Amino acid sequence: MSDAVFISGLALHAYHGVMQHEAKVGQTFTLDLMLDIDLTEASRSDKLAHTVGYDEVVAIATRAFCARRYRLVEAAAGAVAEAVLGRFPLITSIRVTVHKPHAPIAATFADVGVSITRSRRSKG
């Protein structure tokens, strides 16, 4: 299957990071979500029940990302992946990319961040 629902450039202000000032001031992170999902039925039925609503995915991802302070964006990305997979049984796997454009690095850079992929565990 190669069907997917995606959300790119979701900007969220949060307080993640190892440095103490990151916990006080926070910064805006950008998330990209790629959701693997079989859209065969949705493409035939034209019904929201056969897919996932972008608004619901954004709400779940936002809550998971902003609910607490993480020292590592890896942990924040993992929380988003777990929350989305836990809420939407039609999603078979998710790729979460967290961009940290204001990372405290003494260098000029275009972008830094992490990408993680998590899949639903098969039962059996």
Image: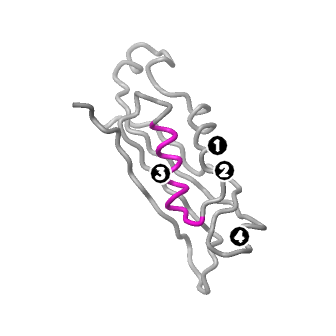
Q: Secondary structure at mark 2?
A: helix
Marks 4 and 1 in Cβ contact (< 8 Å) = no
User: Which stretch is magenta?
Assistant: 71-85
Q: CA distance from mark 3 to mark 1?
A: 14 Å
Location of the N terminus by quadrant is top left
Question: Can you give x and y, in whole percent of width and height, for residue 112 in the image?
Answer: 53, 70
Query: Please, which colouring scheme is shown?
Result: one colour
Residue behind mark 4: 22
Q: Residue furthest left?
A: 124
Q: Nearer the viewer, mark 3 or mark 1?
A: 1
Amino acid type, residue under disc 1 in the picture: Arg
From this viewpoint, which residue is outermost toward the bottom? Answer: 106
Q: Residue at x 61, y 86 (%)?
A: 106
> Which quadrant: the C terminus?
top left
Q: Secondary structure at mark 1?
A: helix
Are the residues at dot 1 and dot 2 in contact (C-beta closer than 8 Å)?
Answer: yes
Q: Which dot marks residue 63?
A: 1
Image position of 43 with respect to 11: above or below: above
Farthest-out residue, front: 124
Please name the residue that numbered disc 2 is placed on: 66
Q: Earlier in the sequence, mark 3 or mark 2?
A: 2
Residue that numbered label 3 is attached to: 96
Amino acid at dot 2? Cys
Alpha carbon distance from label 4 to label 3? 21 Å
Q: Earlier in the sequence, mark 4 or mark 1?
A: 4
